Amino acid sequence: MWRGIFPAVTTKFTEADTLDAVEMERCFALQIDAGVDGLIVCGSLGEAMALEPEEKLEILTLAKSVAGKRPVIMTVCESSTRRAAKAAEAAAKAGADGLMVLPGVPYRSAPRETLGHLLTVTRAAGLPMMVYNNPVAYGVDVTLDMFEELASEPLVVAMKESTDDIRRVSEVISRFGTRFDVFTGVDNLALESLLMGATGWVAGLVVAFPKETVAIWKLVQAGRLEEARDIYRWFRPLLDLDVSTNLVQNIKRAEVHALGSNDRCRAPRLPLAGAEGKRVDDIIKAALAVRPALPMI
């Protein structure tokens, strides 16, 4: 039911550490204007674990007001199933079009615990759900055998595939066909995943470079692979910034240079500084200096 480019948007803060609704509205609108297919709010890139429950609902409502008919998906990332189910119910009442659900973190759950958590949360909301599978970051792999059990729940419609193993996309499609919408969740494996049959891209650097991200998707769908590769090869040093413990700071710094936004984070995160800040700035500036003209699609 979902396909295409779904930005995992950043959360914008004021100097007083409150939500910056005006700047989020501007940045979300840039995504919609570029032709993305939906928005995902309050994820890892959105600093979910630093947000209060009421702030998440405020961001959801704001995104809905900008997205028009495009779906807005709320991320549910909680340390207990009870808390996650409550958050899912609140998101449904606030108008979320779906959920992206993580296993309970930071606890590394056993398979039956993981399945119990995912099913309880999505049934509590009664909304379609994308499983966010990122064992590299969170230590729990939702395996193909586990998806076999999830396949019997019609509300589980998609997966964000972030195992960092390009073989997984093919394995999922070979085993399940079209049962699940398969989204790539690793920016610097995105084109490879799309070429192997992924039906969408939960993207990070898209928040700073929406037109380029959408162009890659559309070119792949049109079979214009060489043009897609040309943009992707230019994009690759930027996409690598997503695969880092500092992905929030890195991508917000890209928003500074590309969109004229800010890179304020919520503590304990702090904006990049010193040598690391210069390294990331240099990567972004080098890419902007040779930013490609995009083809008509």
Image (cartoon, grey):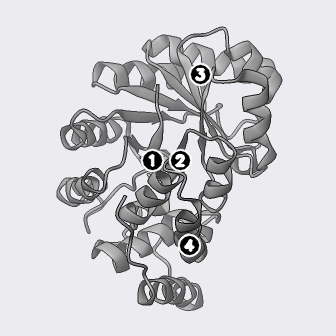
Dot 3 crowding, Cα within 10 Å, few <14, some 14–19, many 20+? many
The residue type indicated by label 4 comes to Asp
First reached walking from the N terminus: tag 2 or tag 3: 3
Image location of residue 176, percent across then percent down:
72, 22
Against 151, residue 243 (above or below) is below
First reached walking from the N terminus: tag 2 or tag 4: 2
Residue on which the image places disc 4: 230
| Residue 52 horizontal side relative to residue 260, left or right | right
Residue on which the image places disc 1: 5
From mark 1 to mark 3, how far is it between C-alphas?
A: 29 Å
Q: Are marks 1 and 2 in contact (CB under 8 Å)?
A: yes
| Residue 155 horizontal side relative to residue 30, left or right | right
From mark 2 to mark 4, how far is it between C-alphas?
A: 18 Å
Image location of residue 142, percent across then percent down:
75, 31
Question: Which residue is depicted at the point 39% across and 67% down?
Answer: 208
The residue type indicated by label 3 comes to Thr
Against 207, residue 47 (above or below) is above
